[in-house]
Image: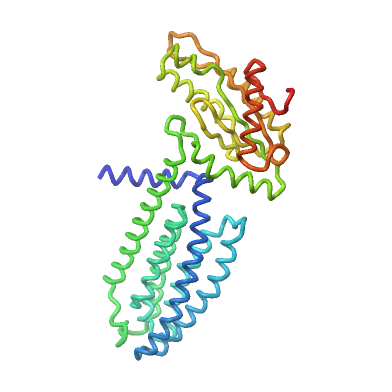
Amino acid sequence: MSTLRETLDDLAAALRERPDDLLLEIGAGGELLVARLRLLVAGLLLLLPLLNALTDGQPTDSLAGLAGATGVTLFSWAWLRMAQRKRRPAWLPMVSSAFDVSLVSFVLVLLGLLSSPVATLNSTVVWGCYLLAVFATALRQDLRVTLFAGTLALAQSSLLWLAVVAFADGPLVSADYGTVHASSQLQRLVLLLAATLVTAVIVFRAQRLTQWSSTDGLTGLHNRSYLNTQVPSKVESARREGRTLTLALVDLDHFRHINAELGHLAGDRALRHAVAVLRRELGREEPMIRVGGEEFVLMLPLPIGAAWERMEALRRKLEAAPFLPEPDVEPRKLTLSAGLACCPQDANDLSGLMKRADQRLRAAKAGGRNRVVAREGD
């Protein structure tokens, strides 16, 4: 029982978190994959009315299936075009998931109008598409989308059941679709709820594994894997859109002395202290990445002059917040040196920015440390 409670608590905590850049990037790729799969499924759905007609199925079923499949195909093209854009709308995952679920409900209603109200509730094949719509959200890597789609499917399926029962003018019995039983409808809702929860747990686990793979275990910062996989696209996007972006290469001054004098455990605490001081001042659009022992990269969406002022303020903040190793040990002042490089003035790719920022970091160290260098000769 405690394990289930912990899982639900973790899911609730994940819902409160805004997905980081890596998860959003993966989710965008998943949205594109869903759009392509939706178009493929739409093509397969066009075969169902034909198969129904060839196997002496109900003409009304074929007509409803053809209308639904045609609608899916047309909308699938539209979703695919939007998913292929460089700058996808932020609302696309939610709206496209709502479309997938609502389309199933639409086809069920159409079946009821063309055939029998019983078809709305007892068409197993069409109702099973609710499950497909929920399972497909796993590709988007967004727990909120999965729970939204599952909740919407539960709500629409329940409303269809209540509406058919409320407006029925006789027993809900059909020669083709059997008898509507409350127990079978409740079982479907339970199955839909279970599918939603299973998909949500799968998404949650995938999110955590993704975050762990790109997160430094000691500081909680992004690691070098994030630098190599995500930052190049940020630089390319800034270059393409004509925005300035400054990379800061930061090194904590004389940090090895702390490890040598106080031990590595104290050194780890000092490192976490320095990171905490800096992160309190950084916004979401200013990711901090650990690339070495006491070396970090900051991405600042600012021109180099404003970025120098930003880094200078961070330097002063760290200098003013000494690290206390133990209650009875004298506090140790921590300082940093930083070299800045700007896109597009200094370089147009990550490698060029890192090289120029490293040159300026070396100049900061050679100039006495505890300083920020943005240009040669500073």
Where is residue 218 drawn, in percent x and y?
43, 30
Apparent side of residue 35 relative to residue 343 in the rendered image (left or right): left
Of the pair 290 and 165, the residue shown nearer to us? 290
Name the foreground residue: 12 vs 280: 280
Q: Tell me if residue 36 comes above or below residue 181 in the rendering.
A: above
Residue 79 vs 349, above or below: the answer is below
User: Toward the viewer: 326 or 167?
Assistant: 326
Residue shown at the point (67%, 46%) measured from the top left: 238
| Residue at 55% in and 66% down | 80
Number of marks in the image?
Answer: 0
Residue 283, picture quadrant: top right
Q: How is the image coloured?
A: rainbow
Who's the residue at 55% across and 34% down the image?
Answer: 288
Q: Position of residue 54 (x, y in %)?
A: 37, 90
Up/down of 102 relative to 300, above or below: below
User: In this rendering, would 222 be left or right of 134?
Assistant: right
Quadrant for the C terminus, please.
top right
Q: Is residue 301 left or right of residue 333?
A: right
Quadrant holding the N terminus: top left
Q: Position of residue 302 (x, y in %)?
A: 69, 37
Compared with 28, 347 (above or below) is above
The x, y position of residue 165, in whole percent, is 36, 76
